[in-house]
Image (cartoon, rainbow, N blue to C red):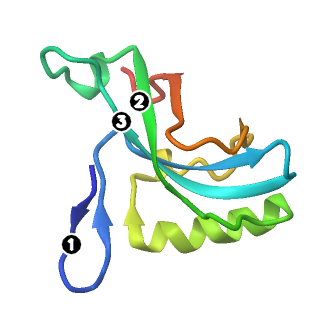
């Protein structure tokens, strides 16, 4: 979830929202992206009790960068505006392979599980 911090144009996110890098495998480009937690229907669970996290893309750098380092620079720029906890800024994780389609859903193990 993106919660506006007011007139400065920054946002706070949910506990399991992430910033990561997509790799457009066909174009060979890299894209900074924001993914929001999309829990399944049912009772809300504590962050530490969730085993598997479903993430849905909410925005990405549309042009992308020709290099991974360029995408990391874009990710750093986005991280100034979209404030995620440090462990949710996946700058050093491998880029997520992507075919260019919109509406990406990713399923990952909960990196914040107790």
User: Can you identify the residue that label 3 sits on?
Assistant: 37
Question: Residue 113 location, x and y as percent?
Answer: 39, 22
Which residue carries the number 1 mark? 5
Report the residue at 12% width, 16% height from top: 43
Q: Residues within 10 Å of mark 2 (few under 14, many from 20)?
A: some
Q: Name the image quarter holding residue 17.
A: top left
Q: Secondary structure at mark 1?
A: loop
Q: Is residue 111 left or right of residue 90?
A: left
Q: Which residue is mark 2?
A: 112
43 relative to 6, above or below: above
Q: Position of residue 88 (x, y in %)?
A: 47, 46
Q: Establish if 19 lies above or below 99.
A: below
Which numbered disc, 1 or 2, marks the residue that appears first in the sequence? Answer: 1
Q: Nearer the viewer, residue 47 or 18?
A: 18
The residue positioned farthest toward the bottom in the image shown? 7
Picture disc at residue 108: none
Q: CA distance from mark 1 to mark 2?
A: 24 Å
> Tag 3's secondary structure?
strand
Give the distance between the C-alpha atoms of the residues marked 2 and 3, in whole angstroms.
13 Å
48 left or right of 106?
Answer: left
Q: CA distance from mark 1 to mark 3?
A: 19 Å
Give the residue at x 36% y 20%. 114
């Amino acid at each position: 979830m993106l919660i506006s911090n007011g007139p400065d144009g920054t946002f706070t996110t949910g506990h399991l929202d992430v910033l990561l890098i997509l790799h457009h495998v066909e174009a060979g480009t890299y894209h900074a992206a924001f993914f929001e937690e999309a829990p399944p229907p049912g009772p809300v669970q504590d962050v530490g009790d969730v085993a598997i996290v479903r993430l849905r893309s909410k925005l990405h750098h549309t042009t992308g960068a020709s290099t991974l380092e360029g995408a990391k620079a874009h990710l750093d720029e986005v991280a100034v505006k979209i404030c995620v906890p440090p462990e949710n800024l996946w700058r050093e994780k491998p880029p997520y392979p992507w075919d260019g389609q919109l509406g990406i859903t990713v399923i990952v193990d909960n990196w914040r599980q107790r």
